[in-house]
Amino acid sequence: MNILVFGQTGQAARELAVYDGVTCLNRAAADLEDPGACAAVIATRRPDAVINAAAYTAVDKAEEDEARASVINGDAPGAMARACAELGIPFVTISTDYVFSGEGDQPWQVDDPTGPLGVYGRSKLKGEQLVQAAGGAYAILRTSWVVSAHGHNFVKTMLRLGAERDALTIVADQIGGPTPARDIAAACIEMARQLATDPSKAGIYHFAGTPNVSWADFARETFAIAGITCTVTDIPSSDYPTPAKRPLNSRLDCATLEAVFGIKRPNWQAGLRDIVKEVLG
Ligand SMILES: NC(=O)C1=CN([C@@H]2O[C@H](COP(=O)(O)OP(=O)(O)OC[C@H]3O[C@@H](n4cnc5c(N)ncnc54)[C@H](OP(=O)(O)O)[C@@H]3O)[C@@H](O)[C@H]2O)C=CC1
Ligand SMILES: Cc1cn([C@H]2C[C@H](O)[C@@H](COP(=O)(O)OP(=O)(O)O[C@H]3O[C@@H](C)C(=O)[C@@H](O)[C@H]3O)O2)c(=O)[nH]c1=O
């Protein structure tokens, strides 16, 4: 199966690149700021499936860059989905827990009302809506707290800061499921394969690592695995002001993904051990 992936340098894209039949497109080959060009690449190359792993992911920066985030995270996946629907091929795109408001403490169901708190979440929600409107054999995979040995992520930030400092204050009231990019890549490939033979599986799905945890406890676990002595003090989000507000409740209910595609939630602790090993050598 020839799978065209938008994104090459990102966490998920790098893990997708190792699969047979996958071709990754970098920004020079397909710039998501030009949705029409992305659609044209699909129409010209005629792959068997498309996975979108590129996005505007700088959550705070997006607050001052809404127009660009909206095109990259909204219009571009919409145009890709329409191009795929025209060819009759599956389209898998990755979305986020940040489409939710973070209220309550129950895991979000796939059909729960959305309510993004910031520009990034709003732009990703726009992408979801345009992809759904395109019809076709689409899958929107909402995931959370992506981590890997590459690119920018919380684990790499902690390994850097933990080596420099004796103590850190980390928010403890945001709860979610850290998700290794490697597991996301495997899920996307499996979904593309199954959608190719059964387009009735199209829809929105949740996929996050288990167990749910706070950022503070996730940092503690990272330090424990890495053998770093750095004291973590719990703080509320209000003590860590950022341009974009983050949801407090990022728990995702992943039951439908397992029921429809047979894909189980990954254990992030196993993934974290691999990532720490890869980063520290
Ligand atoms: N990171 C996270 O914690 C989470 C991510 N997600 C979603 O998962 C998906 C993958 O995220 P992740 O792997 O972390 O992403 P990264 O932040 O690691 O990488 C983003 C990728 O998008 C590319 N990109 C950005 N703008 C453009 C553009 N205009 N044209 C072409 N490519 C562009 C970047 O390329 P370049 O190197 O050229 O900048 C890079 O390859 C995204 O849809 C994201 O919204 C969901 C939940 C959590
Ligand atoms: C570095 C640091 C961060 N924090 C907090 C800030 C924030 O609430 C939390 C995580 O920080 P980050 O900047 O990694 O978080 P952020 O970039 O918001 O991560 C998000 O990225 C987007 C793309 C998603 O889709 C989300 O699922 C989520 O993974 O940790 C501290 O409390 N103390 C610290 O020293």
Image: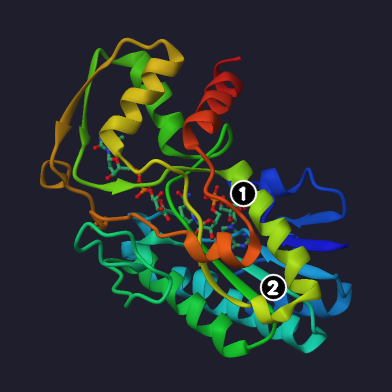
Q: Quadrant of the C terminus?
A: top right
Secondary structure found at label 2: strand
State the image coordinates of residue 141 (x, y, percent, origin top left). 55, 64
Left or right of residue 13: residue 69:
left
Q: Quick check: can you spot residue 232? A: yes
State the image coordinates of residue 39 (x, y, percent, origin top left). 72, 79
Q: Quadrant of the N terminus?
A: bottom right
Q: In the image shown, does 154 or 66 lie closer to the viewer? A: 154
Residue drawn 17% across the image and 42% down it = 240
Which residue is denoted by mark 1 in the rendering?
12
Residue drawn 65% across the image and 68% down it = 92
**Mark 2 → mark 1, Cα distance in angstroms:** 16 Å
Which residue is denoted by mark 2 in the rendering?
91
Q: Quick check: can you spot residue 27? A: no
**What amino acid does circle 1 point to?**
Ala
**What amino acid does circle 2 point to?**
Phe
Q: In the image shown, does 143 or 62 lie closer to the viewer? A: 143
State the image coordinates of residue 270 (x, y, percent, origin top left). 53, 29
Q: Residues within 10 Å of mark 2 (few under 14, many from 20)?
A: many
Secondary structure found at label 1: helix
Left or right of residue 170: residue 139:
right
Does residue 60 sit above or below 271 in this rendering? Answer: below
Q: Which image quadrant shows ligand 1?
A: bottom right
Q: Residues within 10 Å of mark 1 (few under 14, many from 20)?
A: many
Residue drawn 80% across the image and 47% down it = 19
